[in-house]
Amino acid sequence: MDQLEEASDAQLVTLIGRYHEGALAEVYRRHGGAVYGLARKILQNSHEADDVTQDVFLRLWNHPDRFDPPRGTLRSFLLNDSHGRAVDLVRSLNSRRAREVRDANRSPVAAYDLQHQVWDLAVADEVTRALTSLPSEERQAIELAYFQGHSYVKVAEILGQPEGTIKSRIRNGMRRMRSSLVAVGVQGA
Amino acid sequence: MMMTHEEAQELLGAYALNAVDGEERTALEHHVHQCVRCASELDVLREVAGAMGNVGEPASQELWQRISTHLYDDVDEARVPPIRALDSPRASLSPFAPRRDVASRRARYGVAVMAVAAAVLVGVLSVNLVRAENHVSQLTSALNLASHNVVDAALETPGHVNVTLNDAHSVGVVKFVLVNGHGYLVSSQMSALSAAQTYQLWGIINGRPISIGLMGASPSTVYFSVEGSKRPTELAVTIEPAGGSVAPTSPIVASGSVSA
């Protein structure tokens, strides 16, 4: 392995297990933006998103064994962590009160390489397409749960539907999304 | 609270979105732990959730600096940290993970063996520094002694390479000695920085700067390893915010080529 940037995500996590700071920096370079972006989208607050992102990467640093490559990609693992923490924060803040977007102009110096950026954009496009092609009741339930941080019980309350209906809509919608993403070649979905 | 397989399956989608709370969540997790089919479906659904969350923004350099300053707040002692710069508690000097099994390859060089042994001592004592802050001064003395032995041994090892880093006025301000992929600071005339800054060492590999590690605000004892990686053609130093940077953010203050 000549350079860290040529290492696979799994190799980097192995190096992190040996307290290799450069490996963590490389993981941050690859996935930090996505982790931060999701947290900010949920929290609508850049400072809280910073805190969540910091938690996610320090957790990876301190407990790299939590990542199990056969069970999914590192990005999904980190995003799931980011989402879980952001949702916890939203709920504990009882929240929406802190939704003032102080969107500082950020100046990233660790540019993610173009090939990956293009791939990310392509994936994001496909995900948006898959989400918007869902029946509206499924999409609505998923968006309220995922991007607003509501529990499915709360989503049922908001939409005035039985909880069982919401559970089914979310599950069916996600399965449908999965099929759409696999059909267009988005790996890992 | 017990949960049937059917009940668990119905909840998997919501769980993948972190939308299940309380006892229900605990019961579901208990079931998933025992049910291969549910665990497998959950992995798939989490990938979908991950794809949805992939809204992507550029990684923030400022945030990385903040994260990197907390890396050793909660060190798991079961894992072996890299050898650090001794004058900077947060400085880690290992872009390519150091190997601990180098002694056998150096066995034919008695002096080099001494260097490795001393280097290990430095590492062990560095860990102790983390563990027992009230013994810092005692340990620092021992570390300094050990590091001097390391540098002296490295300078006497056959095949060592001296690398001088010159500043903008072509004055050699930093000197390293490299032995078998390991580097040791011999001397530094760089002025001390404020606590908010650090010197950061870079190796130029394939024309690109790769972080070797942080040297601290006032470098005195520095060890690094590039063993097992492509050898840098040049070493360079920049001044970065404390905690270091992913890529250089300021002009090079000293650099020098690494010739065989």
Image (tube, helix red, strand yellow):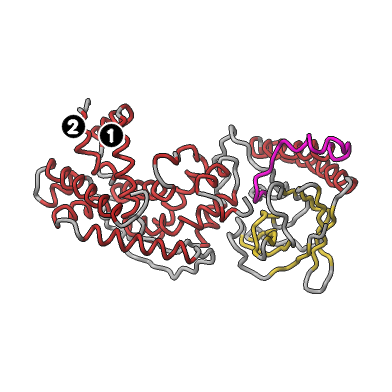
Whether residue B97 appears in magenta in the rendering, the answer is yes
User: x, y (%) of residue A141?
Assistant: 18, 52
Earlier sequence position, callout 1 versus callout 2? 2
Q: Which residues are magenta?
A: B94-113
Which dot marks residue A59? none
Front one among B198 and B34: B34
Residue nearest the observer in this picture, A16 or B168:
A16
Q: Residue at x 78, y 36 (%)?
A: B103
- Mark 1 and mark 2 residues within 8 Å of each other at the beta carbon: no
Q: Quadrant of the C terminus of chain B?
A: bottom right
Q: Position of residue A162 (x, y in %)?
A: 9, 43
Same chain for labels 1 and 2? Say yes or no: yes
Q: Is residue A14 above or below residue B174?
A: above
Mark 1 → mark 2, Cα distance in angstroms: 10 Å
Q: Amino acid at mark 1?
A: Cys
Secondary element at image label 2: helix
Q: Chain of mark 1?
A: B
> Which residue in the structure is indicated by mark 1?
B38
Compare residues A53 and B6 and report the one nearer the observer.
Answer: B6
Number of numbered discs overlaid on the protein picture: 2
The residue indicated by pointer 2 is B6
Q: Secondary structure at mark 1?
A: helix
> Is B221 left, or right, of A6 in this rendering?
right
| Dominant secondary structure of the residues highlighted in magenta in the image | loop
Measured as percent of width and height from the top left, residue B129 is found at 68, 39
Q: Amino acid at mark 2?
A: Glu
Q: Quadrant of the N terminus of chain B?
A: top left
Q: Quadrant of residue A26?
A: bottom right
